[in-house]
């Protein structure tokens, strides 16, 4: 019995050794292929940057993506979630299904960056003529994932499972009156047929130095909800306010009341949150107290219990303040995007992969962000890991770069190889483990 046990251990160790050798060989191939593809990925990125398209209107971008995937022998589905493209690469051996996601849409921003491939594109956003720019780096995400697809397709026979490439429209939000983004793709079954086991995604970051990767277990980016508050009073002459009920004064008091919700109700030492009133409209003349004031704002939270508390308190604060002034307040809250939550077990399992690719000193935990990312809709269905890839020039530490969503937003292209190596290595290691 002891001899049989010893023989079994030896066979197991030998099998593990072969697996390790195979994984090492694939990693070497990924690194070599990524370096070879760098120039091609830069060219793709510049083309997408010069020709951006808004959410649910990424027709030419989707066509270029689909043609590239088809040229690699990857099964392609188009028109998913309006203009989305999904590629399915079946490996030579059975195993799990890993999804990789890139978002494709630009923003209604006019570019000011002085580069040869600067965008001069124009379009229509919610009925208004606008300039269009890739002011959040989605052009880089598409190009990097196209390169990753080429790498993985070249080692198809060695893959122990299936890879699903998701090129998603409208991450920044669909036009008014339309569905879109990750929510619509999930609704249309992008995580099914074949059923996805895990999903990985990256986001280029203009404030992180090229060569570095940042991540966070658990709540990484905030939920994003919108609220509307309609305050109704009684119209009167501005010279005799006692004859009416002033909704402007009431709305002002509500704004101040809303600002105490986070500071007095949220455990800010554990989880950050934000309540912002971004728009107030009401009145037509300086000497008329209007009947109605409308307020619009956003809610951000990194914990679902805090999110629910804020929703309840907004309604309570607004209606009670209005009642105390003799007015009324109607509150409507729309859930837009859930919390981007990195599965803790999956993150712990895959961080050694990112450290192996970038170097342990170049991979670090980042602070949670109050910005939102609709990658969260995939993470509600399957475990996911979303990380940040450096896009600031080496040595700058991101201090000299403009923020995302601004006309001066700029990305250094030196991090694209690391992006491809990271995504491809996550796939190979997950399938192998």
Image (spheres, rainbow, N blue to C red):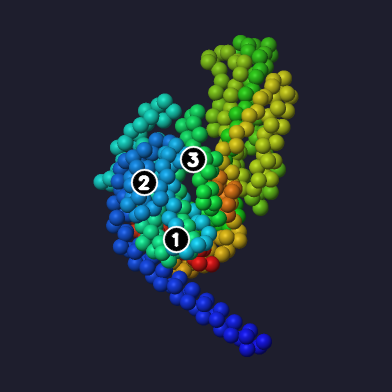
On the rendered structure, is 297 left or right of 311?
left
Task: Give 355 or 144, whichever is nearer the viewer.
Answer: 144
Task: State if disc 1 and disc 3 touch (CB < 8 Å).
Answer: no
Callout 3 crowding tier (Cα within 10 Å): few <14, some 14–19, many ≥20: many
Figure quadrant of residue 327: top right
Residue at 57% across, 60% down: 346
Query: Which residue is labeled 3 in the image?
Result: 181
Residue corresponding to mark 2: 66
Q: Is residue 222 left or right of residue 174?
A: right
What SS does tag 2 mark? helix
Vertical order, 58 against 248 (above or below): below
Whichever of labels 3 and 1 marks the residue nearer the N terminus, that label is 1
Q: Residues within 10 Å of mark 1 (few under 14, many from 20)?
A: many
Q: Is residue 192 above or below residue 60?
A: below
Labels in figure, total: 3
Whole-percent x, y for residue 82 in the image:
44, 37
N-term-proximal mark, 2 vs 3: 2
- The residue indicated by pointer 1 is 91
Q: Name the foreground residue: 51 vs 186.
A: 186
Q: Is residue 102 visible?
A: no
Report the mark closest to the observer, 2 or 1: 1
| Quadrant including the N terminus | bottom right
């Amino acid at each position: 019995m002891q001899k049989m046990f010893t023989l079994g251990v030896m066979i197991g160790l030998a099998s593990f050794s072969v697996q390790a050798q195979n994984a090492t060989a694939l990693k070497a191939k990924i690194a070599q292929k990524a370096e070879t593809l760098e120039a091609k990925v830069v060219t793709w990125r510049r083309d997408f940057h010069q020709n951006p398209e808004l959410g649910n209107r990424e027709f030419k971008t989707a066509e270029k993506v689909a043609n590239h995937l088809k040229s690699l022998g990857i099964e392609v589905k188009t028109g998913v979630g309006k203009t989305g493209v999904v590629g399915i690469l079946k490996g030579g051996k059975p195993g799990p299904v890993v999804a990789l996601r890139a978002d494709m849409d630009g923003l209604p921003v006019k570019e000011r960056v002085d580069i040869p491939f600067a965008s001069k594109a124009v379009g229509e956003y919610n009925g208004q003529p606008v300039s269009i720019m890739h002011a959040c780096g989605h052009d880089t995400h598409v190009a990097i994932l196209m390169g990753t697809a080429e790498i993985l397709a070249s080692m198809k026979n060695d893959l122990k499972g299936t890879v699903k490439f998701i090129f998603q429209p409208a991450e920044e939000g669909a036009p008014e009156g339309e569905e879109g983004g990750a929510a619509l793709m999930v609704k249309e079954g992008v995580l099914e047929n074949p059923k996805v086991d895990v999903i990985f995604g990256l986001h280029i970051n203009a404030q992180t130095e090229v060569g570095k990767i940042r991540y966070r277990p658990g709540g990484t980016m905030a939920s994003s909800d919108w609220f509307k508050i309609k305050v109704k009073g009684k119209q009167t002459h501005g010279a005799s306010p006692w004859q009416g009920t002033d909704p402007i004064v009431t709305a002002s008091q509500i704004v101040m009341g809303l600002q105490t919700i986070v500071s007095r109700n949220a455990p800010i030492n554990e989880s950050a949150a934000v309540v912002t009133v971004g728009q107030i409209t009401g009145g037509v003349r300086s000497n008329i107290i209007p009947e109605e004031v409308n307020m619009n704002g956003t809610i951000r939270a990194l914990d679902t219990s805090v999110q629910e508390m804020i929703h309840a308190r907004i309604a309570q604060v607004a209606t009670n303040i209005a009642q105390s002034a003799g007015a009324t307040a109607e509150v409507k809250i729309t859930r837009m995007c859930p919390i981007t939550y990195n599965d803790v077990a999956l993150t712990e399992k895959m961080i050694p992969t990112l450290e192996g690719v970038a170097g342990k000193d170049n991979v670090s935990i980042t602070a949670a962000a109050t910005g939102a990312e609709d990658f969260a809709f995939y993470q509600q269905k399957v475990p996911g890991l979303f990380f940040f890839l450096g896009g600031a020039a080496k040595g700058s530490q991101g201090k000299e770069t403009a923020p995302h969503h601004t006309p001066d937003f700029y990305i250094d292209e030196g991090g694209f190889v690391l992006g491809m190596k990271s995504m491809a290595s996550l796939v190979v290691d997950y399938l192998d483990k």
